[in-house]
Amino acid sequence: MTSRSNLVSLVFLGFALTASAQTVDRQMMAKIRAEGLEHSQVQKVFDYLTIDIGPRLTNSPAYLSAVKFVTQQLQDWGLSNVHDEPWQFGRGWTLDKLTVEMAEPRYAPLIGYAEGWSPATPGDIVAEPIYLGNKSAAEIEALRPKMKGAIVMLSPIQKVYVTEDRPQPSLPGATGPETLSPPALFNTGREAQQLNTLVRNAGAGVILRPNVLKDGTVYVTGRDNGPSSVPSIIMDSEHYNEIARMIEHGRPVKLRINVQATFQERDTSAYNIIAEIPGTDPVLKNQVVMLGAHVDSWHTGVGATDNADGTSVMMEAMRILKTVGANPRRTIRLGIWSGEEQGLLGSKEWVKRHLEGDANKDERENFSVYLNMDNGTNKVYGFGMENNEGARAIFDKWLAEFQDLGARHNTNTHITSTDHLSFLAAGVPGFNPFQDYEGYDVRTHHTNMDLADHVNPDDLKQAAVVMAGFAWNAAMLDERMPRK
């Protein structure tokens, strides 16, 4: 009987032989490069999403405009089977007006943003805030009758900040962390949740909280808490701290707060957008290589780095392949997801409908690989290989073709918090690349600074070329992508 170590060696040898047997079609790679670098349309798509549409909170009117734009653009490029797949999300939301000011003892405009799905205030609330940050549980309970309609500062002075971006696994000599995740940016522990519930149940007029970023950068998300929710604003931490210190110093402070928002309830569906380049091999055409990115964003910036760049790149990769006349053996499919920011909801729904369960066994068996684009921005440096050694050998070979464009190397890193996880959960290979993280976590990710200035147009071209090349190579393999 073969020993375990010998068996593992034989398996890895098989992976290596499979990878080496696949020749890279350099003529096709040259066509992809020429089209993607010399005739790119990625900036046009990126500009429309960020300039003409702007923030694309799931199921907001702007998001629905993005769905129409993406669908029409894919049709105009001549891609096949372009359609949207609705799924039940809930109501959308748009911020119409926001005032956050210190009215006394001096006037000062303050930096703050309403959380997503925050209800409106009745109008201006002008009052001394109730500061709970230095209060005991008993003192907070005693203040409950005064909270109705009040401005409530929920948190203590912010002293801990996120000041470093996540590590870059693709740097020369780096092996990469075992898991690559964004830093934790909010206290979501039980005590914080209980306090938030107490204040909400007391009928507060508006809740103010700091965040863990600095220098005018404000990390803002949100959720729809239904009809019982309370207006909620995340403030620049230094401004929040200034007000809190004045109160602790015995200096009376009066704030003016006004939140006006509209809920979109006419269409409670969100939409995944699908397009294809059909496979041509009689045996393999029903197998699928899939590209994907999410088009939804948060509402304080324009979603440039999260994730207009990823959506533009994946759309451009499909356009490149269509324009150069690609006739892949397998079908190359594109998925533009929604609801990612609320928990990968769109991709989870698509996977549930098409890959999970006994009813989808054949489609799951025919699914070769999913390539996602989200975390980070600008160039593709390599991929987190999710400890899939068989795919690693293949990806290493493909990535080497793009080293002159800035590609580096792949590592066996597990990347969290994005849509390829939906595919991994279904048992099919899914991967997300490493991109630039400098200034991502501490400046643009889910913040008011997620703006177009942080995206390099030439790097978008590089990313689209790499993704188009990987999609083509995956579609031309003799075998489907190895699974773990």
Image (spheres, rainbow, N blue to C red):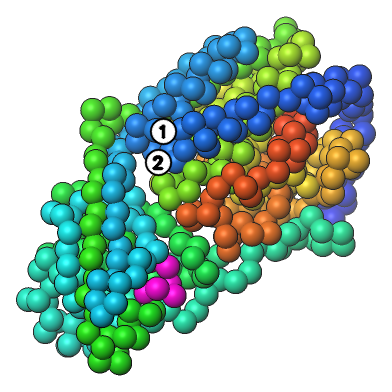
Residue ID at (40%, 54%): 221
**Measured from the top left, where is residue 266 in percent x and y?**
23, 28
Choose top left, top right, bottom left or bottom right for residue 270: top left
Residue ID at (13%, 73%): 147
The image quadrant where one finds the C terminus is top right
Label 1 Cα crowd, 10 Å radius (few <14 / some 14-19 / many 20+): many
**Measured from the top left, where is residue 52 in percent x and y?**
49, 31
Residue ID at (24%, 54%): 259
- In magenta, the rendered stretch is 234-240
Q: Does the magenta-highlighted stretch encompass residue 96?
A: no
- Quick check: 137 left or right of 221? left
* First of labels 1, 2 by sequence position: 2
Disc 2 residue type? Leu
201 over 89 or under it: above or below: below
Q: Does the magenta-highlighted stretch encompass residue 238?
A: yes
The residue that mark 2 highlights is 57
Residue 254 visible in image: yes
Residue ID at (68%, 24%): 41
Badge 1 vs badge 2, beta-carbon distance below 8 Å: yes
Instruction: Compare residues 297 and 411 and report the one nearer the observer.
Output: 297
Name the element at disc 2. Answer: loop
Of all residues, the one furthest to the bottom in this rendering is 249
**Measured from the top left, where is residue 153 in percent x and y?**
27, 74
Disc 1 residue type? Tyr
Of all residues, the one furthest to the front in this rendering is 106
251 over 50 or under it: above or below: below
The residue that mark 1 highlights is 63
